[in-house]
Amino acid sequence: MIKNIFSLLLIAIIMVSCDDGKQQRYVAASSGNINSIVVVADNLLWENEVGDVVRTVLAAPVEGLSKEEPQFSMSQMPPSVFTGFAKNNRTVLKIEKGKDAATQIANDPYARPQTMVVITGQTNAEIIEEIKSNSAKIIDAFKKTEVTEKQRRTSKSLFDDKALNENLGVSLKFPTAYRIAKEDDNFFWIRRDIETGNVDLLVYEVPFSAIRKGDSAVVDVVRVRDSVGKIHIEGALEDTYMTTEPAFTPFITEVILDNKPTFETRGIWDLKNAFMSGPFINYAIEDKMNDRYLIVEGYVFAPSIAKRDYIFELEAIIKSIKIK
């Protein structure tokens, strides 16, 4: 009897621990603040030119903010300390000297979800070259991980986007902390109050001809957002409305959003005839099937405090968009 029970337990353990003949391993849940990277490197590397290059690349200022804020916050620890719970950090940059030059990106090596970038080189010069030549790839890997994590946290309590679906054919995942403050002729103004101001989203459509390709794109994006701001985003005082800060040249890039060509524009908004301003991020999505550009913009009003994480929250929300 005891032998039979032992046999059944052994079979159960084998069934649980094996999947098609492969051993399954337990992976802990990752942890860490959004946009925070742990750098695992010897103190000497971190304190010399290697550390300088890492800081230049990963702590570069976020485009479109009125005051400089780093793209990622970083903390450094030597390899001897990178044990136990320290290995559960969601985003890790590991630098190893004395090995052949290479840059490798590993997914979920110690926790899930986790992105670890491992940079190796025989010398400081080789390591620096790896960082510089792969900077775009490294940043993209970390940023995708953080956007996905922010979207996961947002999905815990989602606002019902039925009105957006019915009027604009759009699905957008944003939390219940937001509210629809204005709905007018397929224009939506979605707002979240914070202690020092507000974090807002705008969703609307314009004719396909409203935004031209090439060098004219940024001019057209600004013209469209200024005309919409004048009509829909009015200030508390008479003759005050949202416009684009003329002294700050917006940054525009071409990206893919919901599998569609998109203009991403970052800049500073200003309330005309008033003393209010802040950063914005605007996506003009090419929707040929519906003969339009769908515009989704996020902006922040939060005087005297850091705004990076608010803009990033808006970016993550906008990147959840699905168009019918």
Image (cartoon, helix red, strand yellow):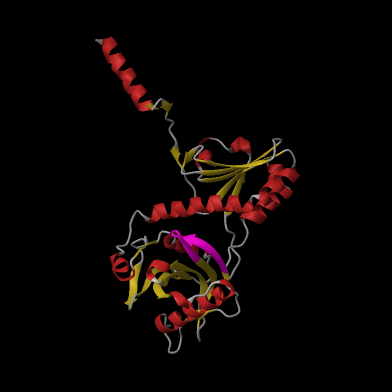
Residue pushed farthest bottom? 238
Res 194 seen here: no
Residue 139 horizontal side relative to residue 322, left or right = right
Q: Is 299 rendered above or below residue 37?
A: below
Residue under the point 31% across and 19% down: 9
Residue pushed farthest left? 1
Residue 259 on image: x %, y % = 45, 58
Residue under the point 62% across and 56% down: 59
- Give the extent of the magenta segment: 252-262
Task: Say whether residue 253 is magenta.
Answer: yes
Q: Nearer the viewer, residue 250 or 165?
A: 165
Give the prevailing secondary structure in the magenta stretch. strand
Task: Say whether residue 297 is magenta.
Answer: no
Q: Is 106 rendered above or below residue 183?
A: above
Res 319 seen here: yes
Residue under the point 44% across and 54% down: 150
Q: Is 83 rendered above or below residue 314?
A: above
Q: Nearer the viewer, residue 106 or 152?
A: 106
Q: Is 208 rendered above or below residue 27?
A: below
Q: Nearer the viewer, residue 289 or 54?
A: 289
Residue 262 on image: x %, y % = 49, 65
Residue under the point 45% across and 67% down: 285
Residue 248 on image: x %, y % = 60, 76
Q: Nearer the viewer, residue 68 or 204?
A: 204
Q: Specify the quadrant of the image occupied by residue 102.
A: top right
Looking at the figure, which quarter contains the N terminus? top left
Q: Specify the quadrant of the image occupied by residue 180.
A: bottom left
Residue 66 horizontal side relative to residue 312, left or right = right
Residue 264 horizontal side relative to residue 236, left or right = right
Looking at the figure, which quarter contains the C terminus? bottom left
